[in-house]
Image (spheres, rainbow, N blue to C red):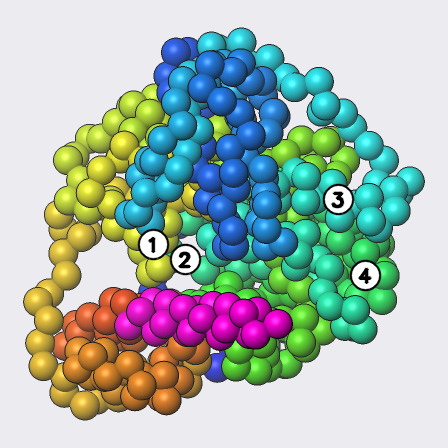
Amino acid sequence: MQTLTFKRGVHPPDEKALTMDKPIKVILPKENSELFFPMSQHIGAPCEPCVQKGDYVKVGQKLGEAKGFVSSPIFSSVSGEVVDIRPVLVPLGVKSLAVVVKNDGKMEEYEGIKPRDYTQMSNEEILAAVKEGGVVGMGGAGFPTHVKLAPPPGTNIDYVLVNAAECEPYLTCDYRLMLEQPEKLIKGLQIVLKLHPNAKGVIGIEDNKPEAIKLLSDMVKDIPNIEVASLLKKFPQGSEKHLIYAITQREVPSGALPSAVGCIVDNVDTIISVYNAVCEGKPVMRKIVTVSGGAPANPGNYQIRVGMTYKDLMEQIGGFKVEPAKMVAGGPMMGIAMFTLDVATTKTSSALLCFTPAEAFIPPERNCIRCAKCVEHCPMGLQPFMLNQLSLRGDGEGFVANHGLDCIECGSCSYECPAKRQLAQSIKATKKIEMGKARAKADAEKKAAESKK
């Protein structure tokens, strides 16, 4: 099997040995513990609470109603009383309005949950089930899946790609799902292919996961429209644009979506969640999280209920053997550093990395030596050193003119920089500012146009 890849990128050590051989262990929230359900767990418009303080809710009951086109409903993962509706801290470091449910420990299921046969469902019914199941990009982006699976009319989809690269160091949650729930993964992909019958399904797996490649290759060998592609272990292989290029040799234009080149990309857990929503009638209520690093007493892969806090998770798996010097929600390349574990997990939570002082050490930032390593390794072909300078000067116009908005925030530039310049951090901050300006300008123009009517 040919090993596929993309241009440029970096090769950090994968650090997966700590957890890759540890099966997924189910961790249920403690009785009488509070679970927090932020109304914004996805890209797009936040949900609006559809319950009130004092209501009794069941497992799988809707807590937040999606009001916008690009949005996704939120469901309770436990049964119990709604004790509050208030802003809470989320992994991004900001606060989001959340429904707070006190778990009664009964795990009483909502009556609306029932299995279905997807072969007897129309495409419209399948999309409705995905939407009502609250399925979003579970790998971190959180884009509502029902929107992604229904591109604009006239769009020809040739490939449905399953992002099974899991290129972030330390993370093994998708790897364990491939080994432990391969039937759901394949069936979920077949459901998506029913929506796009002319497309080929390709499961792209990095070559540091040979067991998963062999298992899934054997299971799909007699399915004509599904195959497995072996990918070179390289970061950021799991980026949508780079996965598409590696498998199809197609390049997604700047500012365009994968559908522009005939592709749909979803990660492993998203595809399994499609199966759960369509065939089992179960909305997104659980998440597989890798806990790793040198500080946790019991690194592993854990199935938790969405809404549990990282603090509750760590207490139930034995806490720390060493006081962590740094805690990261997500992978070490693109994750978010956290100052507290008293933070709610969401649909997009994938990992909690807790590092010892030695693991967390980063040398002090020094002057740029113009070595161009950041340019050599940037997977988007940008000039990070220049974008860093423009960011530090506050030159937003220059930043945009030099394609700073095309940055995928992968951190490859910071990883390769011998001077340890905080390239990714400064670029990410300026990108956020400039995208905010662009949205504000678009909203102002829209209001001005409406006022003229």
Q: CA distance from mark 3 to mark 4?
A: 16 Å
Residue annotated with mark 3: 128
Closer to the camera, 175 or 215?
A: 175
Alpha-carbon span between mark 4 and mark 1: 33 Å
Mark earlier in primary sequence (4, 1): 4
Mark 2, secondary structure of its residue: loop
Q: Is residue 81 left or right of residue 136?
A: left
The residues tagged by marks 1 and 2 sit, at their Cα atoms, a distance apart of 9 Å
Instruction: Please give the name of the residue rendered at 18% of the width and 52% of the height, measured from the top-left corner.
Output: 360
Q: Earlier in the sequence, mark 1 or mark 2?
A: 2
Which of the two labelled residues, at mark 3 and mark 4, occupies the earlier sequence position?
Answer: 3
Q: Nearer the viewer, mark 3 or mark 4?
A: 3
As drawn, which residue projects farthest toward the right?
A: 120
| Labels 2, 4: front one | 4
Give me the C-alpha separation between circle 3 and circle 1.
32 Å
Q: Looking at the picture, which amino acid does disc 4 mark?
A: His
Q: Is residue 131 above or below residue 264?
A: above
Left or right side of 185 for 381:
left
* 296 sits to left or right of 79: left
